[in-house]
Amino acid sequence: MINEWQITYPVDVDDEEAGTDSRNYDDPVSADMFDPMPLQAANWLARNDQVQDDTVDYRAYADLVAPPMLTSIDAPGAFPALAVLGQYDPVTVVNATREDRTQVTADGIIRSITHEIKARIGGVSWKAWVQPDLRSSEQTPLLLPVNALQATDVREDGATFSWTEPTQAIAPTETQVRMNSGVWLPIAYPSGGGFDWLSGLNPSTLHKFEVRLVRKVDELTTHVSPVREVSFTTLAPTVPTVPPGGDGTVVIIPGDVAGDEECEAEWELRRSDDGIIWTTVASGDKDDFTYDPETDIWQLDNTGYEFEDGYLYRHRAREICGGVPGDWKYQEPDPIGCADPAQLGEAPYDDESLVVFVPKICNTQILEAVTGAPATKGPAFGGIGLDAAGNYALKSAAGAGGIVAYGPAGTDELTGDASQAITINLGEPPADGVPMGVWQSAGLHIEALYESSTEYRVRAKIFIASGGSITTTASDPLDVDTEYEIFVSHDVENTSVSVKVDDVEVATGTAGARVNALPVWIMSLPPGSYATSAAVWSSAVDLPTASPTVDGIVSSANAELTGLEVGDIVIYGRNYRANGASTPGQPGASGTGAIGTVTTITANSGYDTSGTSRGAFSCYWATVTTPGDISFAFGTDRLTYAIALRGTSGIAQTKVFAANGNASPSATLDSAPSNPVVGIVFAGGVADVTTPGLSGDYDYAGSVPWLYVGSRRGVGLTIGTGQTLSATLTSDQVLAGGSGIVLLETS
């Protein structure tokens, strides 16, 4: 048995005067159990850590010795009081000196139990030995490591690697890689003998790349090969670059721009609030560069500039030789500052059960916002950008998709109720037939699936405690180059899984307790995509009800709604100056879109059969079943109206008042609504109804003025939740022609 070995070796095999160094490698667990048993120290002609480590590892628990099974009170999961065990009790022993070693499983009975209690600094040591008699055993084969790992193409921000995969007695199910991180990333097996870490690495920096092979059964790891690693140094930067650990106010300027004594140079600091349009906010020339002869690095210091949160910044520089400017060399866009993401102040991201939120950007570094733990840029990292709302987002590389970023999840166990969310804009669908887990954590995956060259679907994948996984149904097709908020909630007690897209449930499934997954998160995207607001909650939270999106038009002949989506609510009808016995009726619908069952809100409000010119008014609602455009029309001298609501599923409460002549209609909600409210006000008079009489405890949340014909005018508005509202038209706003008010609480 050997559990320690010290090796002395030359510092530089080509320079005898460089002297020697030594390295000691031991197995402290083996030394604690069996006392230190060192191999005689040796002098080597060259350093070889792998041979030294393997020699100790393979002999630290030599099978020529029968080591007793050991438990200690200070060991995780230890149970020092072994009264529940007795002699001749059956026992199964599973032994592996490390996770990548051959595993032996043996059956037998307990022969004896021995306890040892002794004083220890800071406490008491309580150890127990169980000595079994083993009757049979089974050996599981070893999973062999990859061979000939090397970095074949090293760049300033990435590298390509190659290796060979040995013939195995048991088949691996996946390859795992990692770069400067404790988190392993899964890739395909067989891998094709290589992997390309596209970008995201710091230039002029020493990096370590590691590979191992893994076998999983029912999503649970059963075998892990030894790790193989290769170290390499990335090339010097060719564009302005933030030095490792920098805050972005100081950048490295490439030597071919700054270092040519015969040429001039110029630089600019540029700013953008959308990542598309850039504005120059500072500039200068070569005199602003400083040179460090020890590191051979040119730098530009802009710490005097007042950087602001919410913007992207980047430097650009170019050489000017003989009065002729060269091409600009651009820094990758970066934010400067360390503000908390704005989303954390909004529901449900402000919920106390939030355990993961990505990204927080802090001086060019990606952080997980709840714990502040740094993230690692993945092999497909393409930079930092902004989403449609101006929030920082992580982008994938343009040339290839894959893992964009990953990091620790900040929680050791998350097997109960949980929720996930991510806002994505995919530049293209995932590969056909290969689902992509765009957001993975807590045993939950949000997956994107190929549908066509311009469409994809989403679903949830749940890894369950009993082994294996289940997937929900998939959503309807989603468009590329469009931003969507994807939300998944898992209620373990009720075994229900819900998938929502933009607050509309699109898929469901059934799953019980999840596996206790590793506490990590992984974000993956197809090429040319971005993602933000990636979150995990330790409860089955729900998205807040969105305020309805209001859009509408009023005209004499028709009211057309364009760009309708499945699930939109359409409210439509007539505002009509009726003569004699005419009734308002229901406008006809036509176009590429379609609606489902129609619900009548009012079919004949305000009609006067006295024969005098009076206003007539009707109102209906239905749900869009086929996306597209719909035109509602009734006829000449009739005011047809339509309004579309998005972010709601129906109508919970209505209050309608339609009037004729010189009456003053009014409408008040019966109770304070718990959902957003839409108000529709019509007037047949000459006055413009842009300021109807409104009262109550409400906040005005916006309006959509409608077109009018002649003296007929209308306005639509929305208010918030939990508030009251009354609306009244004054007599000068109401003349013959079908005046009315509709208040609708959405659900």
Image (spheres, rainbow, N blue to C red):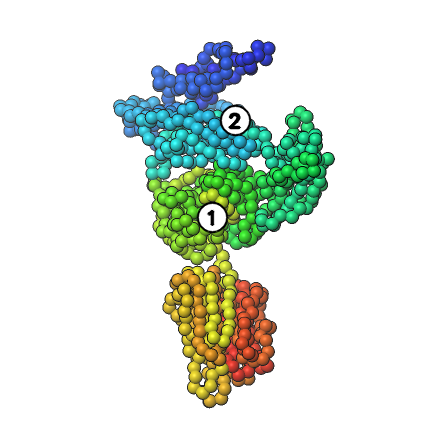
User: Of residues 362 and 295, which is closer to you in this image?
Assistant: 295
Instruction: Please give left or right for residue 745 compared with residue 330 in the image.
Output: left
Residue 483 seen in this snapshot: yes
Q: Residues within 10 Å of mark 1 (few under 14, many from 20)?
A: many
Q: What residue is at 42 percent from the left and 75 percent from the top?
A: 586
Q: What residue is at 65 percent from the left and 48 percent from the top?
A: 279
- Give residue 91's position: percent from left, percent from top: 31, 28
Report which residue position mark 2 lands on.
232
Report which residue position mark 1 lands on.
426
Reading the chain from its start, which is encountered first: label 2 or label 1? 2
Residue lying at the far left in this picture: please name it: 135
What kind of residue is marked 2? Phe
Q: Quadrant of residue 205?
A: top right
Whole-angstrom CA distance, mark 2 to mark 1, is: 33 Å
Residue 414 seen in this snapshot: no
Give above or below for 560 relative to 195: below
What kind of residue is marked 1? Leu
Q: What residue is at 50 percent from the left and 46 percent from the top?
A: 530
Give above or below for 309 relative to 24: below
* SS at circle 1: loop
- Give residue 614's position: percent from left, percent from top: 49, 84
User: Total label count?
Assistant: 2
Look at the numbered discs 2 and 1 and tell me whether their residues touch, using CB distance below 8 Å: no
Q: What residue is at 66 percent from the left and 45 percent from the top?
A: 307
- Give residue 321's position: percent from left, percent from top: 68, 35
